[in-house]
Image: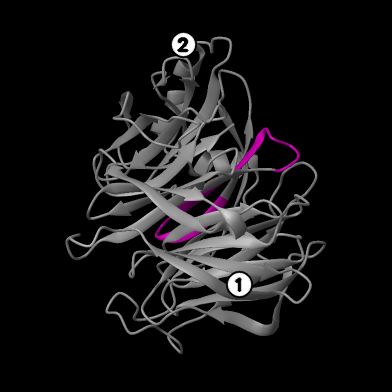
């Protein structure tokens, strides 16, 4: 376990020097929304802090908040919103880091960091009680859990579950398990783990007091062979869940039975037009604040698809448009619902799309900001 002093000692000297410039950051104006932008890849530098102006649809100049390699995912504590948790890579091994969001000169003050043992971290979440942090590794196909103390400190690793290659899908990209997301299911009693490599969504009973996971019966939902379930979006009410499948480029509607702890597929929709080129892959999804529209991004075609949400959460496609970037990793909507933001890793940018809240339709990008390896946007 690394405490704050030890954690600081592991940070590169450049990261410590960068803190001296934080007092120069332009103060936010009234009505702006704070965001942290994560980055990953060879040219990535870490987590950046910026402010979004919903009147103009533009971000302020990003400032370095934490030098953190391999920052693919971040989340805020559900109750103590000034505590931020992030994935990172240290000496090739996945880690989870805890920070306090503070005013200048430190934007993100380290609390501690813990190993996740695996490789290729790409998802992090906290259960609704705020007592359990959960992390998923795509590279090594495993998950980890931690307890969170009242002061925000992460415990040493509690659970580390490795799935290996005993079960894997038929596609070349599925040689073994590849865990792509881990989330607490609606109701807070179960945890859902999307295994891209095994075409499964594992179901666990969660003990929030200890961060222990117990395989449920049934232990998983079996997705279509070669589909590669990637991310989940929960529709309000706790009954419906959207799952995007990376390799078949589809979005499935799953019925969640919270009492029984089961998932049942009730519908599926394509994300691509009929003439789409090969080797496209779905990336992310986002639900509008009023829950009337669902948005999805697709890499390869570098596109965005918009659906209207109808009765029983069923979808009707209303728009296909360009994402205006390369290798989208994250899409999200601002608090006003008037803007959709897309983080594009290989074009090294974050683009902002105007959105009509009444029709759900997107217009051409209004602005963009450059960040090397941009892959995640977290509103704070």
Can residue 358 be seen?
A: yes
- Residue 289 in the image: x percent, y percent? 58, 38
Q: Is residue 129 left or right of residue 100?
A: right
Does residue 355 sit above or below 97 in this rendering? above
According to the picture, the residue beneath numbered tag 2 turns out to be 24
Relative to the observer, which residue lies in front, 46 or 373? 373
Badge 2 density bin: few <14, some 14–19, many ≥20, Cα 10 Å: few
Left or right relative to 371: residue 251: right
**80 in magenta:** yes
Callout 1 crowding tier (Cα within 10 Å): few <14, some 14–19, many ≥20: some
First to last magenta residue range: 78-96
Task: Using the image, tell me which numbered label, if any, was put on residue 160.
Answer: 1
Point 58% across, 10% down: residue = 30
User: Considering depth in this image, is 63 or 56 the residue closer to the camera?
Assistant: 56
User: For the residue labelled by badge 2, is the local secondary structure a helix, a strand or a loop?
Assistant: helix
- Point out the residue furthest to the bottom here: 166
Q: CA distance from mark 1 to mark 2?
A: 42 Å
Q: Residue at x 39, y 36 (%)?
A: 361
- Quadrant assignment for the C terminus: top right
Q: Is residue 261 above or below residue 239?
A: below
């Amino acid at each position: 376990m690394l405490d704050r002093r030890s954690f600081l000692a592991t940070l590169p000297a450049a990261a410590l020097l960068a803190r001296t410039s934080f007092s120069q950051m332009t103060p936010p104006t009234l009505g702006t929304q704070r965001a942290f932008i994560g980055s990953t890849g060879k040219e990535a530098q870490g987590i950046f802090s910026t402010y979004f102006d919903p009147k103009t649809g533009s971000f302020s100049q990003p400032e370095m908040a934490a030098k953190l390699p391999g920052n693919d995912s971040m989340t805020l504590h559900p109750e103590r919103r000034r505590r931020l948790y992030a994935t990172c890579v240290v000496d090739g091994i996945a880690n989870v880091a805890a920070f306090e969001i503070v005013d200048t000169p430190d934007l993100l003050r380290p609390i501690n960091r813990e190993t996740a043992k695996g490789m290729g971290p790409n998802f992090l979440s906290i259960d609704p009680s705020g007592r359990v942090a959960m992390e998923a590794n795509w590279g090594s196909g495993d998950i980890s859990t931690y307890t969170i103390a009242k002061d925000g400190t992460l415990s040493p690793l509690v659970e580390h579950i490795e799935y290996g290659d005993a079960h894997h899908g038929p596609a070349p990209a599925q040689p073994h398990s590849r865990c792509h997301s881990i989330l607490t299911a609606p109701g807070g009693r179960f945890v859902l783990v999307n295994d891209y490599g095994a075409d499964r969504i594992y179901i666990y009973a969660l003990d929030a007091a200890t961060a222990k996971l117990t395989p449920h019966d049934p232990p998983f939902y079996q997705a279509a062979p070669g589909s590669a379930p990637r991310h989940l979006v929960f529709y309000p009410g706790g009954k419906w869940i959207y799952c995007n499948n990376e390799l078949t480029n589809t979005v499935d509607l799953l019925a969640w039975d919270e009492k029984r702890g089961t998932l049942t597929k009730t519908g599926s929709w394509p994300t691509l037009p009929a003439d789409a080129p090969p080797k496209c892959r779905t990336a992310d999804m986002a639900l509008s604040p009023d829950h009337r529209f669902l948005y999805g991004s697709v890499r390869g075609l570098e596109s965005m698809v918009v659906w209207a949400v109808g009765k029983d959460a069923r979808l009707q496609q209303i728009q296909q448009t360009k994402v205006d970037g390369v290798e989208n990793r994250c899409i999200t909507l601002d608090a006003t619902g008037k803007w959709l933001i897309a983080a594009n890793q290989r074009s090294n940018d974050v683009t902002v799309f105007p959105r009509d809240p009444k029709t759900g339709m997107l217009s051409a990008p209004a602005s963009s900001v450059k960040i090397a390896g941009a892959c995640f946007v977290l509103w704070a």
